[in-house]
Image (cartoon, grey):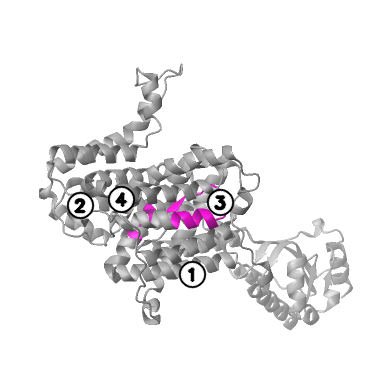
Amino acid sequence: MNISSFRFRPALVDALKGYDRTRFIHDIAAGLTVGVVALPLAMAFAIASGAKPEAGIFTAIIGGFLISALGGSRVQIGGPAGAFIVIIYGIIEKYGLGGLLISTICAGVLLFAMGVFRIGTWIRYIPVPIVIGFTNGIAVLIALSQLKDFFGLAIVRMPGDFFAQINVLLAHAQTVQPITLAIATASLVLMFSWPAVFRNNPDGSPKAFRFPRLAGLLKPLPSPILVLVLSTAAVTLFDLPVETIGSRFGGIPQGLPNFTLPPLSWDVVKQLFAPTLTIALLGAIESLLCARVADNITGQRHDPNQELMAQGAANFIVPFFGGIPATGTIARTVTNIRTGATSPVAGMVHALGLLVIVLAAAPLATNVPLAALAAILLHVAYNMGEWHEFRRLGKFSLNYRILLVSTFLLTVIFDLTVAVEVGLVLACVFFIFRVSSLTQIEQIPAPALPVWPAPGVVAYSIFGSLFFGAVGKMEVLTLPSRIPEKAMILKMTQLINLDTTGLDALETVHKTLQKNGCALILCGPNHQPLSLMTRTGFLDRLGVDNCVEDLTHAVMRANSL
């Protein structure tokens, strides 16, 4: 990379041009709204990941502020995300919390480097079925991990392995707590039904509310906050015997997080290479997908490389304050846009609003029931998955179906890293097969030639790409029955690409023909194949007179031999 091409320019710089009081008011309103939405999600994501609830809140505050201030999107909201839950849980189970912090720091460095070297634009090349497959797989794992708190099962700690989780859940199925299940079920029903309450009739009148003014006041209230408030109030007023944030974690500290240094060493970093790569890859994919969703809604365009550098900075700094990995979050970003955000200031306000809540109201979280948070995450998992894609599989090719289903199953049964690696390998194999199947070598009949060929002259046309996956099709030209007495013409006007393996196959054809006293004549090669043949000296060995511009000259050259 040319270092002169390095560019660090946050979207905030351009967004503040022409910034006025009206936009500032809109950004404050949007930021505060998103902050309220982010509070229960941040706690729920952290708890589900095996960390303390404050880890999620501090990640939303610090990571969210940095991603907005330094990012390449004007409206993206950063923070802890549901997609990270199973990844973080597995890392903590295997390497401990210290291992997670070190992995996140290293992932931050890797993400920043990806932005510096402009790899952000490459993320879009990950095939859609792979993204859908691992997203649905993560959604299934999130839902599975929440069944313990949803039913109130007496399980000390859920294992990270899929089949082990199933066995543990079944083994403790008789320990269901009715009160916990009732709170969780009511919370989940409310999460799904709340938006429908305000759905209007065809004539525009409220469907469920007889009092339009009351409906107007309640409509902006996010369903996660409503669930959090009502469930906490029920537990507090009726002293319900359910597990809460206070009973499991002792509450949330009312103050700023302490700066701590994780035990960094090169040996530990080497052991954590796989988790680091997983966090960086998932963070990059999620943040850039989120930014693209925001672009589709706003009509703006984000800078993917700047966004990766912001994600890198956030994930490098957050672990020093006990945080977990952060990335772009689609639900909060869409909420930010729909509530009127105009610049990254809204995201910064969202982080500052969360900070004020922690400083002023942290003790109120003590009685938040974990069953309600489990219901919130089940709702998140449902909305996260693109389940309709399974119903549509029959409309797509076999390759598409194999990619999506295999990535989904590997994510659920093994982990995201294995799923993406295998998915990409399969995608490459399918692509090679597809392109090679399009490559054709056909004989051109004598009447179709512009000049009638002399006896012992034959012509072939090559269509497609002559690369390592298609060189087998060149073997037909070296069969004894196909070798002419005088000359073989290869029309290359429709050959769009030639790699070194394809060139080696071409060299083999040339040598075989030469041994049999037959000349090879090429006509009309495009720029890329011609450049490669020139640079490698193949044209010199072939003879410059045997590479001509069109089929007419090729036949005339062959007839003259």
Vertical relation: 286 (above or below) 534:
above
Q: Quadrant of the C terminus?
A: bottom right
Q: Earlier in the sequence, mark 2 or mark 4?
A: 4
Q: Quadrant of residue 70?
A: bottom right
The Cα–Cα distance between marks 3 and 4, rounded to whole angstroms, is 26 Å
Q: Which residues are magenta?
A: 63-87
Rendered image: mark on residue 109 = 1
Identify which amino acid the numbered label 4 is placed on: Ala
Rendered image: mark on residue 22 = none
Identify which amino acid the numbered label 3 is placed on: Ser
Identify which amino acid the numbered label 2 is placed on: Gly
In the depicted view, which residue is nearer to us: 330 or 561? 330
In percent of width and height, residue 50 lies at 27, 59
Vertical relation: 499 (above or below) 254:
below
Q: Quadrant of the N terminus?
A: bottom right
Q: Left or right of 483: which side holds 371?
A: left
Q: Which residue is mark 4?
A: 44
Rendered image: mark on residue 73 = 3
Q: Quadrant of residue 46?
A: bottom left
Q: Earlier in the sequence, mark 4 or mark 1?
A: 4
